[in-house]
Image (spheres, rainbow, N blue to C red):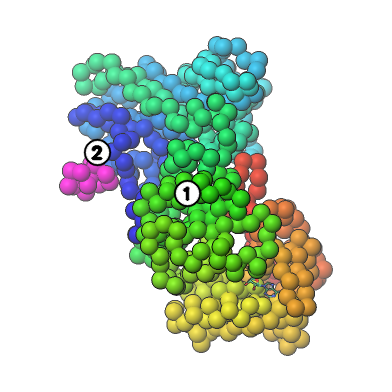
Amino acid sequence: MLELWRDFDESWILHEDDDLIAVDKPAGVPSQAADPGHDDDVVARLKRWLAARRGVTPDEVYLGVHQRLDRDTSGVMVFTLRRDANAALARQFAERTLAKSYVAAVSGLRELASERVLRDHLARGRDGRMQVVERPTGGAREAITRVRVRARNADRALLDLGCDTGRTHQLRVQLAHAGAPVAGDRLYGGADAVRLLLHAAQLRLQHPGDGRQLELCAALPLEIEHWLANGPIDAASDPALLRRALSLAVQARYRLGRLQHEDAPTSAFRLFHGTGDGAPDLAVDVYGEFLVAQLGGDMPDERQHDVLDALEALGPAGVYLKRHARQKNELGDARDSAWAPASAARGSSAEEEIVIHEYGVPFGVRLGAGLRTGLFLDQRENRQRIRRLASGKRVLNLFAYTGGFSLAALAGGAADATCVDASAAALAWARRNVARIGATDRHRTWHADAFDALAQLGRRGERFDLIVVDPPSYASTRNRRFVALKHYQALCEAALRVLARDGSVLACINHHGARQSKLRRDVMRAVQAGGRSVALLKDMPAQLDFPAAIGSEPESKSVLLTCD
Ligand code: SAH
């Protein structure tokens, strides 16, 4: 197993004595558990780590929590280690007698004077985001932020910030309102950056035990300095930046990484996703102990070596390499071993086919057989949705490839599942996958063009309760050229003709040119054309491990439609 997701790293500790412990919280780690049942927050993680160090259970570790930081903000957090230390610290937080300062990297700040106090009223808007309100009503709260420019570079600046109030997203909202959003701020219009560039740099307090002044400082993260210097946005351009971007990506996926240890484990997911993680030409996937790196085809050799070195340093059994041509000719490239070497580029190679798991369901994947591994990781959560919906249902899986959705449906108790695909090799793979879970008697494969298969099913009067429509962007078979952007509605119309009453369709498209709104529209039009009525049409959320670039939609989009 890839052991990247330890609870805690000793290097995060800034200060520790009998009363207090202060840590430099990494960006991406929540300071409080977002929902019950997930113990991925810094408090739970620190508790587990302290417990292991002391040889006790986590419940026996006392940690007094006085502070919160946004998940994507890095920097100082202080906790009490003894109950008696609480009152003295709580008082300082409540009365704001301790000095907290933040550093933010912002853009657009040409006019702002070098020192300024921002006073606004904030309220939660209808879209859930906080906003500055010009005419404060009942719900609005005053926010006061002191701003000092620490360094400038053209329209970029680093600001030292002090807060006299502590409202939700206060700094981010007030700076955005002042025309200088924090870089990397996805909610409030920040410029492109590898993360939210907001850092809790310093906390000065009176020690609750002996009353002495204690100054806790968390060093400025590399990416903040780099951004100010207007360095290249591509983290793969520099080994130190790349290591940093990888470590941010690892923290952002802690919850997924821990799923390897569950009783029903998940051992494959995306570790690093292109622009969304700070390097446009790099994607990295975890498959059990192995990593698979996908690089832009024109990345220079030397840089490729740096990337592979950085990945090897993460400790996998081996690292596979796939290079993607700029001009995609999928099938041709997929066979070319120069683009996808059969053995690992670093470390040792895996067996020809290895088994990974998604929520306990086994899938066979081949890491050295072309550009694809046999599993599209961006559909993991959709597979899980299908699994939950499938009990007792008749399932049709169009463009089934290696049968991922059918496998999920069968694992979820589907009455039967039919895989339709134009590739015999993919269907043989699907049968191997299904055999592994002992569900062959509920599974059939059909080697056919999806449109032809739908037409035949329609003529025969076969109906399905659950249909998955997940075509490639482009495909040419012997007698058809399919272009998802053009033919999606027609495809849905054909699928709806074989949808049973109260049936559902999971409609997916993976194309940067297809927007979520277009997918919805194509699906709606197909429903109208077929004279059906919609009971439910729901956008499926994108996966945590496939973050979109700032200001863009995720590439992989899907909706779940249920018809009356
Ligand atoms: N839905 C799959 C991924 C689809 S990959 C999954 O969940 O893993 C695209 C698949 O579509 C390939 O397996 C390809 O063989 C198949 N394909 C392409 N054109 C087709 C067509 N016209 N009819 C049926 N299958 C097609």
Q: CA distance from mark 1 to mark 2?
A: 46 Å
Q: Position of residue 455 (x, y in %)?
A: 76, 81
Q: Which residues are magenta?
A: 48-62
The quarter of the image that holds ligand 1 is bottom right
The reply, left or right, for residue 353 in relation to residue 421 is: left
Q: Which mark is residue 305?
A: 1
Q: Position of residue 67 (x, y in %)?
A: 38, 30
Q: Residue at x 60, y 23 (%)?
A: 156
Q: Quadrant of residue 91?
A: top left
Q: Which mark is residue 62?
A: 2
Q: Residue at x 65, y 83 (%)?
A: 447
Please tell me how crowded label 2 is: few (under 14), some (14-19), or many (20+) other residues with Cα within 10 Å. some
Which amino acid type is shown beneath numbered disc 1? His
Q: Nearer the viewer, residue 555 or 348?
A: 348
Q: Nearer the viewer, mark 1 or mark 2?
A: 1
Q: Residue at x 49, y 77 (%)?
A: 433
Residue 179 seen from this side: yes
The reply, left or right, for residue 17 in relation to residue 203 is: left
